[in-house]
Image: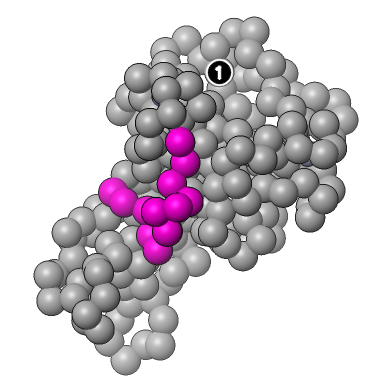
Amino acid sequence: MQATLMIYNGTAAPDADVLRTGGVPLAPARTTWPMCGNTCGGPMQFFAHLPVDYGVLSVFVCQNDPGACDTHDPVSGANRVLLFPSAELVPVAVPEEGVTLLPAVSAITTAVVTLEPEEADEDGLPPDAYDLARGGWKWEPGELFGKQREVLGSLGGSPSCLGDDRLPECPSCSGVMEFAAHLEEGIDRRSAMNLGGDLGYVFVCRPCSQGAFLRD
Ligand SMILES: [Zn+2]
Ligand SMILES: [Zn+2]
């Protein structure tokens, strides 16, 4: 069993085409900034730029009036995941009003963690690769915790502790979407994405080029 953790790796240029949280979104020319479809109608905040082998996932969540717009559900309109082809991306023009950018950019490196089967099996619960990998990140015997705050999420694999009833349907084909990434809040206040203490989940339907976000 493996998990591909996303690990905090200092900062990056705000328009770098690398795994990062914060900075500006990169998208095909003439892409407009996603607006909130829940209650505020303002521009959403850009959370993460996630290049994957089938394109680039771009994650937005409304933060104009935290708590006012419901960002939990994929159908709320207060969050958005866009899937773009990898080539010919340019920075999207940032709206002048609204809460649009995180104060700091966090570069992300990946680490593939291989879990021993016996590690994955305690308590008789179904093994949760992400939880085990995150909990064990840089954990040394005798320490209470590892360096979990360095873990900014993971790529691929299966969603951690998420009920089947929360798996999003693709808005185009109505199929069950493929899990793409977990997102954690971040390493400090400046770089943090406001997930309300939850874990963020990113889903994708590759054939339809659709994405979805939820938190739980
Ligand atoms: Zn909103
Ligand atoms: Zn679809």
- Identity of the residue drawn at 33% across and 61% down: 130
Q: Residues within 10 Å of mark 1 (few under 14, many from 20)?
A: many
Which quadrant is the N terminus positioned in?
bottom left
Q: Is residue 21 visible?
A: no
Q: Residue furthest right?
A: 97
Find residue 167 and report its horizontal and vertical position in percent.
Answer: 43, 46
Q: Is residue 84 above or below residue 205?
A: above
- Identity of the residue drawn at 30% across and 81% down: 140
Q: Is residue 203 above or below residue 192?
A: above
Residue 91 appears left or right of 107: right
Front one among 69 and 33: 69
What colouring does the structure picture have? one colour
User: Based on the displayed image, in which of its 4 quarters is residue 101 positioned?
Assistant: top right
Q: Is residue 154 visible?
A: yes
Q: Residue furthest bottom?
A: 142
Which quadrant is the C terminus positioned in?
bottom right
Give ligand 1's quarter of the image: top right
Residue 164 appears left or right of 76: left
Residue 97 appears left or right of 127: right
Say which residue label 1 marks.
27
Q: What span is colored magenta in the figure?
A: 157-169
Residue 202 appears left or right of 197: left
